[in-house]
Amino acid sequence: MTSVRPENRPLLALAAEGTRHGSRSHMTCFFRCGNACDQPEPNPTDHVHIRDEIAKAVGRRSFLRGGTITAGALVVGGVVQSGGLAAAATQAPRRPGAPTGHGALRQAAFAPVEPNKRDAFVTAKGFDHDVVIRWGDPVVKGAPEFDAHTQSVASARRQFGYNCDYVGLLPLDEDEALLVVNHEYTDENLMFPTGAYSADDIKRIAIASHGMSVVKLRRHKPAGSWKRAGLGHSRQNRRLHDATVFELTGPVAGDARMRTSADPTGRNVLGTLNNCAGGTTPWGTVLSGEENFNQYFDKGTGLDPRYAAEYARYGINGSGKGWSSVDPRFDLSKEPHEPHRFGWIVEVDPYDPTSTPRKHTMLGRFKHEGANVALAGDGRAVAYLGDDERGDYLYKFVSTGRYDARGTRAARANNLDLLTRGTLYVARLVGDGTEDGVFDGTGTWIPLTTDTQSFVPGMSVADVLLFTRLAADKVAPTKMDRPEDVEPNPVNGKVYAALTNNSNRGTASMPVDEANPLAGSQVRASIGAPLTNASGNRNGYVLEMTPDGGDHAATTFTWDLFLVCGDPAAPETWFGGFDKSKVSPISCPDNVAFDSAGNLWISTDGNVLGSNDGVFRVPVAGPNRGQVQQFCTVPKGAEACGPLIADDDRSLFVAVQHPGEIDGATFENQASTWPHTDAFPRPSVVVAFKSR
């Protein structure tokens, strides 16, 4: 390992100004997404698509019809216990690892965690947590114990990667399961001691620290707690990284625009980058979304003019991380097709550690937050997808084939093929006017392409799937406020989308509409500070969609804004009709999950209300519909990712991403030391459970 003097440490320069995403630090914005919010808006379209009364002054809306109660709901301890729409009968069997019982997280009444700035993982009283696995912990055989001063590419490819995000849990037997986790991005300022590594060594290790991990877990005590099994030597453990081969599937595989010097076939890609959220399929695989992939590519001697419009729509401008100095595939002047090989949904089979992971081109290419699958009434697989950018769109995919539940080898082969053929849609939402006091309306799924026929004039099937954003622009879908996690509720059959925020909402290029109504909100600079006005949608929404006829394959739906997030004291907020004086403040919803009662669990990213981020429980039906209660907060500078309710509702898994990522922090001057096992922070997965 080449040493350099401390003053020559290759720290990356951070932007000093610019609109931040929520309360994110400049560090987070730089390392996670390449300062996406400071760049020109990738979506330049100005199509008019909403027929409604534009929301002019939100004020104190009564939302007269927003708090409906689902017939037949039984409420115990203030939390919905059963019931839901008839659509629930058409849902997929519960995915492996999903809750099926009556655990404490579903039933318990708890005092919500108060907003705080502690450097700790804080749970509601009566609950506790364990750290399951940390950055650098051994994953596969041969992995050394972690030492920040002796990191290498070889060790990074065997250890738990940096900045964990999506969390999935797939059962093996009564006492063991496989944990599957994404590693979204790296923060070189916090990872590397000054003077210990050369600039190129840092880049190589950072590249290897991306990807995914599969780790075997074993039940622990008390009930709901889990620990690692095998300490990195389990046969099922796996580390997917920059040297892992991923197979491309679907119509774009082999396309000339997918071919590179290293892969003249255009069918095999090394690695997966910026993996954000994901989902577990009914057939026991994990889907992972490649999100801000655009930031990894350097300009080199210049951008290929053939792809000027396509690059621009995806935010590919050549302002990369300098990785081309250690790997020429990140030089756009040498390999203009390499970015086309990222931005896909990845499918991994955790049960088969020898299987080749795949990138499914049939699900379109954009900044995927993740993918979550339900089954239509006729057994077709339906995947819901969000494109995480200001002013981008909601999508769904409906397979041609049908899910086979027989459990045979032939059935599994059939199911593993479901995401390779079907129809890709984009959503248009229409408001019905705000005279009724409710932000709601109807929606249509507009077909973009099947695997054999494009519905977008002037674009082939491969064009639509490779440049999905440009294809969608042509059919005038609804520009949303950063659609992130989109997930079907297995109990009531509705679909919930986290719309994190949009500081540009209300500008000339992004006017308000009924689905995105706020051009201003009220926020707090710190805990206890007075509310102040801020432009744009600073706190985000949770969108609730109901497929017509209760069938996920339907091409029409109704919708409402279930939550208009923010401080309950702010007049624009709305909590499903629940009493605003009895809810927790919530800001910047990011990921969603459900327990076996159908209660919604929300994790946040970029809270602007003066507190650390956290995870919240919210009933979606019954008299407590909309009762937002904060269950936990994460440490200083961190984001709450996941979350996952598992083990018969006894376990809440949370990925604590980028603890201590606060402006000015360095390896020698850390803003956090969580989980307090070292003098520096380590992104980690934790599991929360009921105390003894």
Image (cartoon, rainbow, N blue to C red):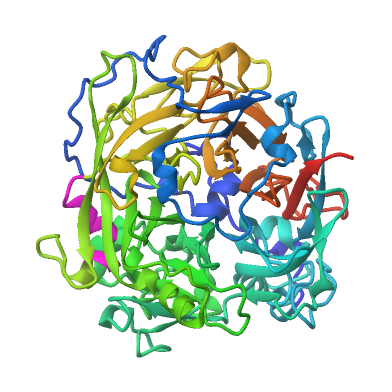
99 vs 118, left or right, is left
473 part of magenta stretch: yes
Side of 88 where 422 appears, left or right: left
Main SS category, magenta section: helix
Can residue 396 be seen here? The reply is yes
Q: Is residue 157 above or below residue 439?
A: below
- The correct choice, above or below, for 379 with respect to 582 in the image is below
Question: In the rendered view, does 22 fall on the left or right side of 315?
Answer: right
Q: Is residue 628 one of those drawn in magenta?
A: no
Considering depth in this image, is 477 or 611 the residue closer to the camera? 477
Quadrant in the picture for residue 250? bottom left
The residue that appears at 56% across and 79% down in the rendered structure is: 326
Q: How many marks?
A: 0
Look at the image and give the residue range highlighted in magenta: 464-476
Query: Relative to 651, is 189 above or below?
Result: below
In the rendered image, the quadrant that contains the N terminus is bottom right
Could you tell me which residue is drawn at 83 percent across and 73 percent down?
230
Q: Position of residue 430 (x, y in %)?
A: 23, 33
Quarter the C terminus occupies: top right
Residue closest to the eye, 531 or 343: 343
